[in-house]
Image (tube, rainbow, N blue to C red):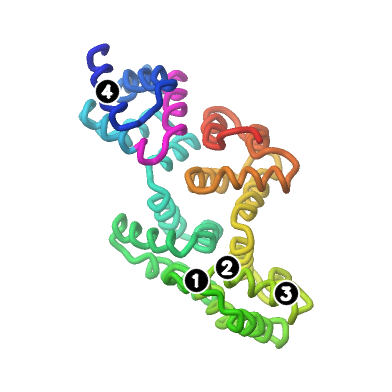
């Protein structure tokens, strides 16, 4: 492999796929992964699996794409298929997730949540209620490219009632004005109060309209102003006024508007409250936020939960899955 390794190393260096300190690891990767040594006797090799974890969890999505292209050019086979053949279980889910862009990953998670019998409302809420307008626009675009269907139509077909109306409003919202209008802030705060706590029953349509059509800075000021009208803050009002998936959705929205990284830190803590872990939630947040704001999530986790995210993951996971998540986590704060 020496001559071929040198050629491929040159290609990878030219594309800035790794820094000199990582060359030895990449040489192993080139030899054992890029050339497709996936024979049956090596399929469960600890060496192969550890190399995959070491390389793919320490690269950006764009770098992982370049690695996949290099693999396909040299091995004449699809790297995703090779990874599926070499991995299994929770680790496979993590690694295959990393081979997608953030928008592709979110779109795929949404599709999986509404595919087949039943709907995974928790996943829908986690994604649609926590992403920025720009992120949602990209998810809609990618969803159409991947599945040849409109995201809004698929969500509408699998949800119902006010919950469906809220998700649809979020899925198709446009970028709101960033201009701070203090009169509008006061009007929205009063409208939220009049539509909820002040009256018997809740005007959910009003709540949906305001929370899906305003900018984050605007809504942050609205929720502060809201306290001058209501004896309860916005989150307390939501808990009093609505229940079920609608309650979870509004709470997620407000928590993300106020501090998105703290929301994810709390979700991670909740996923690892008891022995073991809710792997689906843990995987989704770690994979989807690793190139977005995971470092800030780590900081919020430490500040609010008394220990580092790294330590908590180490306590509630095991094996190769644990090694992959800890590598993505990036450090023990």
| x then y, percent, for residue 124 | 50, 60
Determine the CA span between mark 1 and mark 4: 46 Å
The residue sitting at 56% across, 58% down in the picture is 122
Q: Quadrant of the C terminus?
A: top right
Tag 1 residue: 178
For label 1, the crowd category at 10 Å Cα-Cα, with few meaning under 14, some 14 to 19 and many 20 or more, is few
Determine the CA span between mark 2 and mark 4: 47 Å
For label 2, the crowd category at 10 Å Cα-Cα, with few meaning under 14, some 14 to 19 and many 20 or more, is few
Relative to residue 137, is residue 180 depicted above or below?
Answer: below
Tag 3 residue: 240
* First along the sequence among labels 1 and 4: 4
Q: Magenta span covers which residues?
A: 44-64
The residue sitting at 38% across, 59% down in the picture is 138
Tag 2 residue: 217
| x then y, percent, for residue 9 | 29, 22
The residue sitting at 63% across, 51% down in the picture is 267
């Amino acid at each position: 492999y020496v001559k071929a390794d040198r050629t491929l190393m040159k290609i990878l260096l030219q594309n800035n796929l790794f820094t000199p300190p990582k060359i030895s690891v990449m040489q192993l990767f080139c030899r054992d992964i890029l050339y497709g040594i996936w024979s049956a006797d090596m399929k469960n090799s600890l060496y192969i699996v550890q190399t995959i974890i070491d390389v793919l969890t320490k690269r950006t999505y764009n770098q992982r794409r370049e690695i996949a292209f290099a693999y396909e050019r040299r091995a004449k086979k699809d790297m995703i298929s090779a990874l599926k053949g070499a991995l299994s279980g929770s680790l496979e889910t993590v690694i295959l997730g990393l081979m997608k862009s953030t928008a592709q990953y979110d779109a795929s998670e949404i599709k999986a949540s509404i595919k087949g019998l039943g709907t995974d409302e928790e996943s829908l809420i986690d994604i649609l209620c926590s992403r920025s307008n720009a992120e949602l626009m990209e998810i809609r675009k990618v969803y159409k490219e991947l599945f040849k269907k409109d995201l809004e139509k698929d969500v509408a077909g699998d949800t119902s009632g006010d919950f469906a109306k809220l998700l649809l409003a979020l899925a198709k919202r446009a970028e709101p004005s960033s201009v701070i209008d203090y009169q509008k802030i006061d009007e929205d705060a009063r409208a939220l109060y009049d539509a909820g706590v002040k009256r018997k029953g809740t005007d959910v349509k009003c709540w949906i309209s305001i929370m899906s059509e305003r900018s984050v800075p605007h809504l942050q000021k609205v929720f502060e102003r809201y306290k001058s009208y209501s004896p309860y803050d916005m989150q307390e009002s939501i808990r009093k006024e609505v229940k079920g998936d609608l309650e979870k959705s509004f709470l997620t929205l407000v928590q993300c508007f106020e501090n998105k990284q703290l929301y994810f830190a709390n979700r991670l803590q909740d996923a690892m409250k008891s022995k073991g872990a809710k792997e689906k939630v843990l995987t989704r947040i770690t994979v989807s936020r690793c190139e977005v704001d995971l470092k800030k999530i780590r900081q919020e986790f430490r500040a609010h939960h008394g220990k580092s995210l790294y330590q908590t993951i180490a306590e509630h996971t095991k094996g190769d899955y644990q090694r992959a998540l800890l590598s993505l986590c990036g450090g023990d704060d």
